[in-house]
Image (cartoon, rainbow, N blue to C red):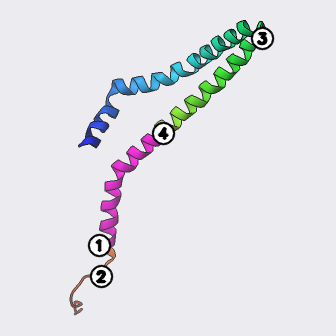
């Protein structure tokens, strides 16, 4: 029953929109945070170049996080496909095994 609620929640289009739009905001937000931290470090250390490292670090961390989200979404899709086709594969294997087994009982005589 809990799996049914989880599946319904995962198939809700608004949840999917939220999940994928998060990826779109991830990189700009990471770059902005890196930039702001770099500006703070520049202000505290009385320099004018550390913000560049903050931007680069933010971009790299944004891409890493985006790749993690994409891999997680791919793994969830693969698991969902395996779960939906798992029952079909089990039924096909059962049919194949029953077709390969010789019939039980005495053999039939040929005319």
**Residue at numbered disc 4:** 74
What is the C-alpha distance between the residues marked 2 and 4?
Answer: 42 Å
Circle 3 SS class: loop
Disc 4/disc 1 C-alpha distance (Å): 35 Å
Magenta region, mostly helix, strand or loop?
helix
Between 74 and 36, the one nearer to me in the picture: 36
Structural distance between the alpha carbons of marks 2 and 3? 80 Å
Report the span colored magenta: 75-99
**Residue at position x 35%, y 58% in the image:** 89
**Residue mark closest to the camera, 4 vs 1:** 4
Query: Residue at the spot x=33%, y=72% of the render?
Result: 97
Q: Residues within 10 Å of mark 2 (few under 14, many from 20)?
A: few
Quadrant of residue 34 within the rendered picture: top right
Q: Whole-percent x and y of residue 59?
A: 65, 22
> In the structure shown, which secondary structural element does the residue marked by tag 1 occupy?
helix
Q: Position of residue 96 (x, y in %)?
A: 33, 69
Q: Residue at coordinates 60% horizontally, 13% vertically from top-left?
A: 32
- Nearer mark to the viewer, of 2 and 3: 3
The earlier-in-sequence mark between 2 and 4 is 4
| Residue under label 1 | 98
Numbered marks: total? 4
N-term-proximal mark, 3 vs 4: 3
Q: CA distance from mark 3 to mark 4?
A: 39 Å
Is residue 98 a member of the stretch shown in magenta? yes
From what the image shows, is residue 12 above or below residue 32? below
User: Residue 49 bears which disc, if any?
Assistant: 3
Mark 4 neighbour density, 10 Å: few (under 14) some (14–19) many (20 or more): few
**Front position among marks 2 and 4:** 4
| Disc marking residue 22 | none
Q: Is residue 50 above or below residue 81?
A: above
Q: Which residue is identified by label 2?
A: 102
């Amino acid at each position: 029953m809990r799996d049914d609620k989880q599946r319904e929640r995962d198939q809700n289009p608004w949840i999917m929109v939220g999940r994928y739009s998060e990826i779109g905001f991830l990189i700009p937000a990471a770059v902005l945070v890196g930039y702001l931290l770099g500006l703070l470090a520049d202000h505290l250390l009385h320099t004018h170049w550390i913000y560049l490292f903050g931007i680069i670090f933010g971009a790299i961390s944004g891409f890493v996080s985006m790749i993690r989200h994409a891999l997680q979404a791919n793994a969830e899709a693969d698991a969902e496909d395996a779960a939906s086709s798992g029952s079909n594969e089990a039924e096909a294997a059962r049919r194949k095994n029953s077709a390969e087994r010789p019939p039980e009982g005495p053999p039939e005589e040929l005319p």
